[in-house]
Image (cartoon, rainbow, N blue to C red):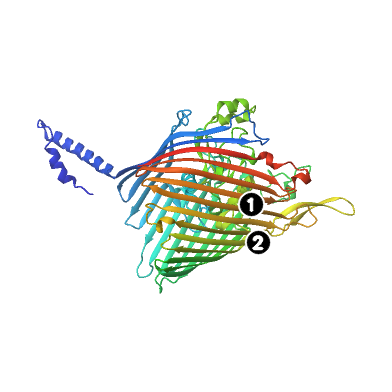
Amino acid sequence: MKVNLKHILPLLMLVLPCHASTQDDSLSRIDRLEQRVASVMSKAGIHFGGRFKSHFLLSRIDSASPGVAHDLKRDESVEYTSVDFDIQARPNDAITGRLIFRMHQDWRNFFSDISNPVFSRWISIDGLVADMFGYNVGDFRERYSPLTLWSPDIEVPYEPEIFARLRRDAMTEEFLGENNRVLQGLNFNFDAEIAPIFRELHFNLLGSRLRTAETSIQNGSAVAAMIETAPMDRYLVGTNLDIMVLPGIAVGGSFLDVFDSKPTFDGSNITRDTLARQTAIVAGRGGMGTALFLDPDRMNFKVNIELAQSMDDTSWYALDSADTDTDGVYDSLVSRDLQSDNITGTAVSVDLAGQVALGSVADLDFGVGFLRNADDFRNQMAQSPSFLGQRIMNIENDAGRDEALYSTFDAMYRHVFKFTPSEQFVSRVDLDTLDWFKAPYRKISYTNAILPREEVLAAGIFDPALQLVMPFGPATPNRAGMRGSLGVSLFEKGIRATASGMSVEEITGMTVFAGRIQADTLAMDTVAQIMPKTSFLELGAGLSVDLAAFIRPLQGPLRLSGGYTHAAADNAGLEGYPLSPYAVTSGFLNAGLYWNFWKRASALLGYQRIETDSDTYLTSATITTVQNHWAVGLEYKVTEGGVVTGSFGKVDVDFADDDASTTGDADPSSSNFDQWQTELFLTVEF
């Protein structure tokens, strides 16, 4: 609403003091009134939103694992109240300032930490000019396509709602979702219809800092992870153009440049020049559908093709006789012959998708696709995972280092904004290096950090239950094969059934250095060998039924859902070498119930089971890991935006070695453990 100050000031003058003696006094008061009115009108666009959250979680672990010191704490709790304020100041559409900050109070130590009770989560200046030009300065979210700018978020088909709400809450901590990358910098968008040439045109230009060389921030001073720092600053510059020529016909292209800033490196020039990286990604795509001559609401088919190429530079100092010292040893500080080359890799994606609507009776959708991503295709903006599984609850017994106590469910559904271990833990562990545990720090498996592939592989923290086939998402390198999906909805989506599958294989076998004993001399020779190509398979199916669509007395939804996903990796191994054939299989079962049985009250029930068989050359037998997870809960919506949820459940993990009794291996069942968890959650959105 626009207000003319000329219409307001005469009314304001009526309330001016009658003893204003001079014209100058009146004019000065008018100026002050104008400033006050302008200030009031500018605040008319201020919007306050956010969410209050109180959370209590008690988790008790029981295990006979050798890595667990049972004289320490078995119980670990999460107890806090926090509020996220979302403040948006918008004098007009052309400019909006947004700030999201958190005030966090831990019930056990009053504040999250005394030096920093307020934490800024999001700061940006956004705007939209003439409904065409949009911009973001500060924090923003963006995505292009699965091979260019994309966040490979994990997916759990038919996930029970009692667990899905926990995963949504954990991902929200990092502003993850809808495969958007969370970036910080400058973002510009232009969206328009240029008739009669184009139906739609979308142009984007962005710049962002991905990592920083800053290392002076001590643990506890900020909620930050070590993976957010690097030897030097890393930046991204990108642009994207998508054009819809006609309904159903579109073309587009993207360019990304990820590079390190050498001036931010504080080491020697030799190390700087060889460590600094620059990766450029160029992509083009096109799509054609039937929307031009068929009613897309009834029947629609389309083909999408995308081709991407990466160019990653590599640098080294050439070895020359002049670069050796008197002993003939190569001296890297002498050489100045810096050479470089580009490692190129391509990725291709072809997809055919279709939807057919049969009125209110049924809907059918299907998809089939082909992918081929070279081993040298490098694009951390699409390959950096957003989930890096790690232990969250009950880490005080072993400082979080016992991998046998890892659970997929704990990593996927739990997070702690700021965790302060007990004094009992620090005093009983006779390691000075663990004193840093006293400082509040963060525990979460989700991240919006951008990590190169080699760093992720070096960490070795992929979860086979979630990331066995395509650990880096759709742009996973060294994969080629087919994928497909089929879905059917009946009776206005009262029944929904789906099936999906993917069969891919490595393009290039992994090069390893393997040793073999010669039969004639009994000597060991170690040579470079190329492993056979590993094949991967993923199959899934599920069913969801809302009984309220068929039983009239039911007031609210009564949804039953169940799904199963099978994933496998298989390699034939090297004959004659210790690298024997290996196979990893994992099955993920989900079953859930959500019943809104009375007005604002709902019952929740969920069960999950993951069974993983691992037979690798690192073990002499097949290790079977079975993870069970169940929970029951009650949800009550106090008011619009206010929800209270209570639940009780258990995580149970069992290990078994099929041949432990005959091979003499240690019985892995000694590491079996379970976690009993009681939880109360209150959220109020405003």
- Could you tell whether 35 is left or right of 599 in the image? left
Q: Are marks 2 and 1 in contact (CB under 8 Å)?
A: no
Residue 495 visible somewhere in the drawing: yes
Local SS, label 2: loop
Q: Nearer the viewer, residue 657 or 91?
A: 657
Mark 2 / mark 1, whichever is N-terminal:
1
Q: Nearer the viewer, residue 8 or 629?
A: 629
Q: Amino acid at mark 2?
A: Ile
The 10 Å Cα crowd at callout 2, few under 14, some 14 to 19, many 20 or more, is some
Locate residue 38: give its quadrant. Answer: top left
Q: Amino acid at mark 1?
A: Ser
In the rendered image, the vertical position of residue 354 relative to residue 184, given as above or below = below
Label 2 or label 1, whichever lies nearer to me, is: 2
Q: Position of residue 47 (x, y in %)?
A: 32, 43
Q: Position of residue 76 (x, y in %)?
A: 54, 33
Q: Nearer the viewer, residue 261 or 106?
A: 106
In the rendered image, the vertical position of residue 293 relative to residue 4, given as above or below = below
Q: Which residue is mark 2?
A: 507
Q: In the rendering, which numbered label is found on residue 315?
A: 1
Q: Nearer the viewer, residue 222 or 22?
A: 222
Q: Position of residue 504 (x, y in %)?
A: 62, 61
Q: In the rendering, which numbered label is found on residue 169?
A: none
The 10 Å Cα crowd at callout 1, few under 14, some 14 to 19, many 20 or more, is some
Residue 173 visible somewhere in the drawing: no
**Which residue is pictured at 68% across the width and 35% down the height?**
66
Local SS, label 1: strand
Mark 2–mark 1 Cα distance, whole angstroms, equals 26 Å
Q: Quadrant of the C terminus?
A: top left
Q: Position of residue 449 (x, y in %)?
A: 53, 46
User: What residue occupies the far bottom of the structure in this picture?
Assistant: 293
